[in-house]
Amino acid sequence: MKSFTTILRSGIAASAIVATASSVQAQSGSDDVQQLREQIRLLDQKLRVLERKQEIKDETAAAAPKPVAVAASDGRVEITSGDGATSLRLRGLVQADYRWFDSANEPADTFLLRRARLVFEGKFNNIFSYVVQPEFAGTIQILDANVNVAVSPAFNVRIGKFKTPVGLEQLQSDPVAFFNERSVATNLTPNRDVGIQLQGDVLNKTLNYTVALLNGVPDGGNNVTGSADFDSDKTVAARLFATPFVNQKDSLFTGLGVGLAVSLGDYATASGRTGGYRTDGQQTFFSYDASVVANGQGVTWSPQGYYYRGPLGILAEYVASSIELQRGALPVREVENFGYNLSVGYVLTGEDSTYRGVTPKTVFNPSAGTWGAFEVVARVSGLDVDDSVFSGGAAGRFAAPNVSASKLTAYGLGLNWYLSRSVRAGFNLYQNKFDLAPDAVPAANALIADDETAFITRLQISF
Amino acid sequence: MKLLTTLLTVAALAAPVFAKDIELLNVSYDPTREFYSEYNKAFSAHWKAKTGDNVTIKQSHGGSGKQARSIIDGLSADVATLALAGDIDALHTNGKLIPADWLGRLPKQSAPYTSTIVFLVRAGNPFKVKDWDDLAKPGISVITPNPKTSGGAQWNYLAAWEFARRKLGSDDAAKEFVRKIYKNVPVLDSGARGSTTTFVQRGVGDVFISWENEAFLALKEFGADKFEIVVPSLSILAQPSVTVVDKVVKKKGTEEIAKAYLEYLYSDEAQDLAGKHFYRPTSDAAAAKYAASFPKIELFTIDDAFGGWTKAKKEHFADGGTFDQIYAK
């Protein structure tokens, strides 16, 4: 507008000068010159008025409070206040599986609603945020319910129920992991618990720290009901995760992250340390005797890391878990279990692989000739249970060798098809090999009597 | 005695440690920026010396009516220093934020300084503007803000109306006279400072109906060789009013300091600052000191000519009032 009026004004002035000159030559009359000057003045005023009106309009628009914004994309709905300080976001996750098994115990092939969640996220005053995430598949429960106070990027306080900051894959969001099911190593990392957590990014976002004080949950366990602690002893979990090259966008190691996590607590429980360790096919291959309880100190530590570059992604972690257990009135014994996971993914269609998942460049649309993104994944993982759990005879051992394996080595291959940013189909083939305890003679139909082969397909929508 | 001396010394040393940091928000109208910027420093120093507390005063400026609306809508103003009592009345009638009898809580009907309305014209007064009549003539371009949002504009409007009523003898004639003036208004800014920008900086218009202090400020800032002040034969006694916003200060716990902030406007120091910034002081000493600065004009009051702000607002500036009738968008 301004440039237009400037040009127009220049044009008017030039025309007027020419006209003035001609007029002066033709008539040599000062009246005509005066009239032309007046015309120029009036036109100039008109242009100034137009400019000023536009200026006022712009100022008014800039000063006006921005209206509440409602945005919906990829199924996600977000309502944000005009100043952006307050928002409510509604998200969801549905995972529908079909599972084939080839195992000694011949579990039923089945359709399964693996996860069905609604996620309510919000923030207000730019400082406070919250998450409430109910789970409707399987055991209906509140998975996450916490309030976060973001004092600064380096200092956040979270209170409520949230993931314990230990396992790298455990901390990754469900729908973006390489495989439909997390590796067997996550059997040893604590899952969601109730407590308070401090966290933040420091050193120009190259180091993330997390420290949490929690009630304490078993290996792989959830505090399902968010209930009160069994005793007054608490668990401390801490994690340091460094991404030293994250600010160097052209570095070969921009996507490198390494960390170490530890949890330490005193446990006294009414039941076993864990409900059981499960295979990739989610069948229990190890469980403690029902009369075994935790009674003493438990320590879990996990060196971990990932590397993402272009379509390549690698995620690795090692987990060591020790816990003092007791059966009946027998002496307390320490048990040490170990797990590991090495997963690799490669996006065939060239999109970037990241810890937060893959965003396809195109969406599935046969009429347009676009198919989304495809990713191949492979994994080897394992879980080695302390052999001492099988010693002590039938009355003193912690686990029965005929129903629980001493070691599991799991291999996985898979293909992920990203039909859109929100929709993913996954096809995973798992082969789980069991090592038995000495002298174990499992029944022919026991799970551990033979390798487990499982083919798990999934269609998920995550928004 | 030694114990007493020790205690007093400790108390004196500890005083800064226990000094409070207080923040006030003064929501004001457009042309008071410069005055309150200097006054706030003076009051902070005064309050620090008196109590040891540190006070920071934030300022918000805009069209007076618009500012009143913002306070009613939730802007946490500790004090409102608006262009006219009518806008402060709205804090009671529309927001129940202050009591109905707010006007009598401070001296001079809560108007610590006054002003009036004059004309600002370009150097040499090319259109020979002398009085209100000249603003109603065809072909002259008049700058004044929007009376719907600006307190200053309401003073302008009523001054023109009363001039015409006295000269032409009736309200109908006055209405027609004011209609002619607004026919000559090419741009309606939302506040007086916006109109100053329109006239002084953007070069729009031939005459600017202006607060007296704003006209003096334009001369000071942009040079007396560029503009001239024309004093009409009759104008209005403009009484910008101030009040504590009771509901806000009670919630924030700033009642005492907010009250003191406004009371200090009547002090010698503040009255001198008002004169310095071209407001007409209400104290005798400062009025005498700055008497020569202000032209002699016959001034009428809103109460005498229009029966007070409540009546004037209802008749002229409410929806469907005379302004809506004469001003076609």
Image (cartoon, helix red, strand yellow):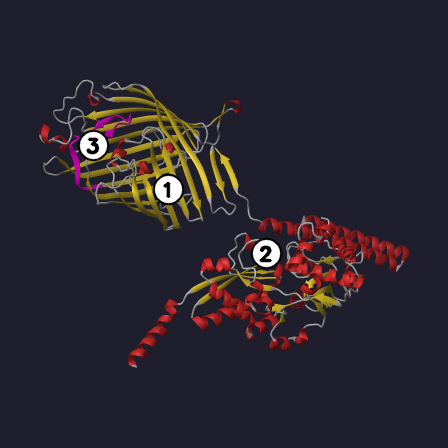
Numbered disc 1: secondary structure: loop
Residue A388 on the magenta span: no
The answer for which chain carries disc 2 is B
Q: CA distance from mark 3 to mark 1?
A: 32 Å
Residue drawn at point x = 55 percent, y = 66 percent: B105
Q: Position of residue B221 (x, y in %)?
A: 64, 66
Residue type beneath disc 2 = Ala
Q: Nearer the viewer, residue A346 or A95?
A: A95
Stretch of the chain drawn in magenta = A274-299
Numbered disc 3: secondary structure: strand
The answer to whether residue B195 is seen in the rendering is no
Residue type beneath disc 1 = Phe
Q: CA distance from mark 2 to mark 3?
A: 77 Å
- Disc 3 crowd, CA 10 A, few/some/many (<14, 14-19, 20+): some
Residue type beneath disc 3 = Asp
Q: Position of residue A381 (x, y in %)?
A: 27, 31
Quadrant in the rendering for residue A110: top left
Query: Residue A253's mark?
Result: 1
Q: Are marks 1 and 2 in contact (CB under 8 Å)?
A: no
Q: Earlier in the sequence, mark 3 or mark 1?
A: 1
Query: Residue A57's mark?
Result: none
Q: Nearer the viewer, residue A125 or A25?
A: A125
Q: Is A120 situated above or below A447? A: below
Q: Nearer the viewer, mark 1 or mark 2?
A: 2
Q: Is B11 situated above or below A256? A: below
Residue picked out by circle 2: B90
Q: Is A350 situated above or below A152? A: above
